[in-house]
Amino acid sequence: MNELLVGKLEQVDITNWDFEQLKGELQKILSDYKGLVYTDDSIKTAKDDKARLAKAKKAIEDKRKAYKEKCLAPYNAIEPQIKEIVGMIEDQRLVIDDVVKDYTGRQKAEKEKIVRNYYDKKSSVLGDLAGDLYEKLLNSNSKWLNASASKKKVEEEIQTAINNVSDDIAAIKAMKSPFEKTLIETYISTLSVDEVRSKHEELMDATAKAGMSQQADSILTRQAAEAEEQAVVSNEEGVILKVYAGQNQLNQVLDFMKAIGVKYELQ
């Protein structure tokens, strides 16, 4: 690196640098380094070249930092005062924000009671699934709790949601799947019949790969129905089964066990 150029940069104020001229001169100087091949014998030359380039870089960076500090000096002088003023405003804003949040929370809680009461009156068609489905439906329709949402509009949407869910569950049961319980759980989690169908296909594919016969559907369905009808004593003895499987395989095993009415406990 040309020592005269570095010295010139250090002596001249950065605001008076001719950057286009500087880039041109640097390109010429740096071009001398391109294509150089350093060998073990010339490693000292490589180290010297590296040091010269590092020195030039430092000289430019020092000038930049000094100029930046100079430019920021007026701002840095008033920044603490500005932040203090903003802090005073923010402190009071937060106090009022707490009041608004408390009011909004109480309003939503009251609105949620109204929504739940109406839902409970209309959701008997969903049977035992009504409770689990309520939380999912409410999360999917948070606008029901908005103060701007009219009572009539919310009630209409709740009834529509119940009707849609009822139709979906009927469609799932009509599939006559041996994994109906798992499919219902999937639906409650996703509210998506497409996800249910995908889950059903996944389980049936796993069944086929496991070498089960084509009669597996009817056998598993019958066993699941019998298991649901029987009162199972919670403390009945069982066996300890260790399963070595990946997460997806484990999920499939658990689904099979549910389908045939086997109770299990994860440790």
Image (tube, helix red, strand yellow):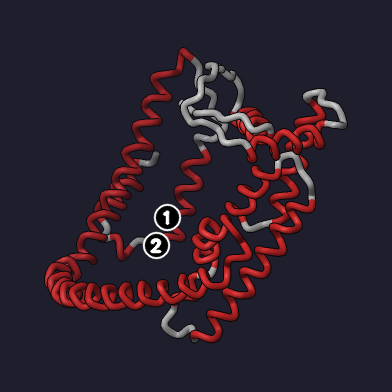
Mark 1, secondary structure of its residue = helix
- Which is more toward the observer, 225 or 138? 225
Give me the residue at 68% from left, 67% from top.
164
Residue beneath label 1, please?
22
**In the picture shown, does residue 99 fall above or below 55?**
below
- Which is more toward the observer, 3 or 216? 216
Mark 2, secondary structure of its residue = loop
The x, y position of residue 87, in whole percent, is 16, 71
Residue beneath label 2, please?
18
**In the picture shown, does residue 225 fall above or below 45?**
below
Mark 1 Cα shell of 10 Å, populated few (<14), some (14-19), many (≥20): few
User: Which quadrant does the N terminus fall into?
Assistant: top left
Q: What residue type is disc 2 on? A: Asp
Residue furthest to the top = 41
Q: What residue type is disc 1 on? A: Leu
Give me the residue at 57% from left, 36% from top.
231
Question: What numbered label is drawn on residue 48?
Answer: none
Real-space Cα distance between discs 2 and 1?
6 Å
- Quarter of the figure with residue 206: top right
The x, y position of residue 99, in whole percent, is 22, 77
The x, y position of residue 186, in whole percent, is 63, 48
- Which is more toward the observer, 38 or 85? 85
Give me the residue at 50% from left, 75% from top.
118
Instruction: Count numbered badges in the picture.
Output: 2
Residue 141 located left or right of residue 166 = left
- Which is more toward the observer, 199 or 231? 231
